[in-house]
Image (cartoon, rainbow, N blue to C red):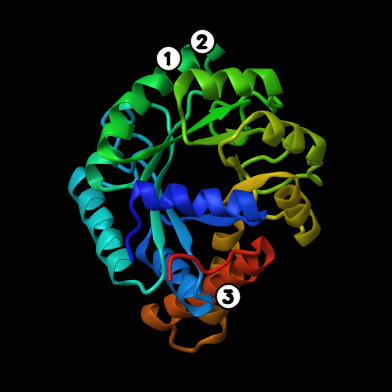
């Protein structure tokens, strides 16, 4: 079932109360999206599929699709989610502009993320509040970020989230989810990440809305479970799913005398699905809304 913003809020509130987490898996292609759908359906648990502002007229060099392709992809995700027997939330991830968030709202996302984390806090508050004012009347939730999680282009290093800054940010903007920086980075880890579980617990104590952990791929089972116990509710996950699926596809291609696109892609997607299922179990994700 395709989850609305109101229903997503209920699911996240339940996860926060019961100390388990929703896996928020990025899908930039239909194979990855189907792997996420199948993983959730096999386990009969909810999932969040994250997209991106694929067609950003202000950033043509980084656009992944043209405007038409972006619309087609989103419509396919919406239709597939509506046909799923489990709750599926569609979320617009890491969008630095107000206009990008509007595109996500118009496309049918249940929630959107405005990322002003590299701006001074007053500017971050201002743009986030503007998105909230547009999204909430449409029934769409808003995720914001305070304390920048590094790893994206233009990042200038880790900045841990200060508790009082986060409290001010949440109270000033009216956001529904808060992404915080607690020791993770986007992409492949070059060294062992050191998570600040005490900071997570402090943030949960001061902030009543769900906390989000970005840059989560590659963490150990113990790290995930400790972060969730401390207060993380939504876990963003992408890079290592692609690595696992890509390696499986590469091995299938190398071992076949006549590699066929369909079978190679299916092998990679199946490996990605199994990896996603493994992490849904680690996150303790439970069935909801039966």
Q: Is residue 269 above or below residue 3?
A: below
Mark 1 touching mark 2, by CB under 8 A? Answer: yes
* Mark closer to the observer (3, 2): 2
Residue 162 seen in this snapshot = no
The N terminus - image quarter: bottom left
Q: Earlier in the sequence, mark 3 or mark 2?
A: 2
Q: Nearer the viewer, residue 76 or 31?
A: 76
Query: Quick one: SS at disc 2?
Result: helix
Question: What is the crowding at mark 3: few (fewer than 14 residues within 10 Å), some, or many (at least 20)?
Answer: some
Q: How many marks?
A: 3
- Gap in angstroms between the C-alphas marked 3 and 1: 41 Å
Q: What residue is rendered at 70% in x and 51% in y?
A: 228
Give residue 24's position: percent from left, percent from top.
51, 53
Give residue 207's position: percent from left, percent from top.
62, 31
Question: What is the crowding at mark 1: few (fewer than 14 residues within 10 Å), some, or many (at least 20)?
Answer: some
Q: Which residue is mark 2?
A: 122
Q: Which quadrant of the view contains residue 117?
A: top right
Q: Which residue is mark 1?
A: 126
Q: What residue is rendered at 48% in x and 17% in y?
A: 125
Query: Quick one: SS at disc 1?
Result: helix
In the image, which disc is placed on residue 260? Answer: none
Q: Which residue is mark 3?
A: 274
- Gap in angstroms between the C-alphas marked 1 and 2: 6 Å
Q: What residue is rendered at 27% in x and 59% in y?
A: 78
């Amino acid at each position: 079932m395709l989850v609305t913003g109101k229903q997503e809020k209920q699911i996240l509130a339940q996860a926060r109360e019961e100390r388990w987490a929703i896996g928020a898996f990025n899908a930039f292609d239909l194979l990855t999206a189907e792997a996420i759908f199948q993983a959730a359906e096999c386990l009969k648990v909810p999932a969040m599929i994250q997209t991106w502002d694929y067609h950003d007229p202000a950033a043509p060099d980084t656009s992944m699709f043209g405007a038409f392709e972006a619309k087609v992809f989103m419509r396919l995700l919406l239709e597939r989610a509506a046909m799923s027997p489990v709750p599926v939330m569609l979320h617009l991830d890491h969008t630095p502009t107000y206009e990008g968030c509007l595109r996500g709202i118009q496309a049918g996302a249940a929630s959107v993320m405005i990322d002003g984390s590299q701006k001074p806090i007053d500017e971050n508050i201002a743009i986030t509040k503007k998105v909230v004012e547009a999204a909430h009347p449409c029934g769409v939730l808003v995720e914001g970020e305070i304390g920048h999680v590094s790893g994206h282009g233009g990042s200038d290093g880790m900045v841990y989230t200060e508790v009082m800054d986060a409290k001010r940010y949440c109270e000033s903007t009216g956001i529904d989810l808060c992404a915080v920086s607690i020791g993770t980075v986007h992409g492949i880890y070059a060294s062992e990440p050191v998570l600040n579980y005490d900071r997570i617990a402090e943030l949960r104590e001061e902030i009543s809305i769900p906390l989000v952990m970005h840059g989560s791929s590659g963490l150990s089972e113990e790290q995930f479970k400790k972060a969730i116990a401390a207060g993380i509710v939504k876990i963003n996950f992408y890079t290592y799913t692609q690595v696992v699926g890509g390696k499986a596809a590469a091995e299938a291609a190398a071992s076949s005398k006549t590699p066929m696109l369909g079978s190679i892609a299916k092998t990679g997607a199946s490996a990605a699905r199994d990896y996603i299922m493994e992490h849904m179990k680690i996150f303790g994700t439970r069935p909801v809304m039966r």
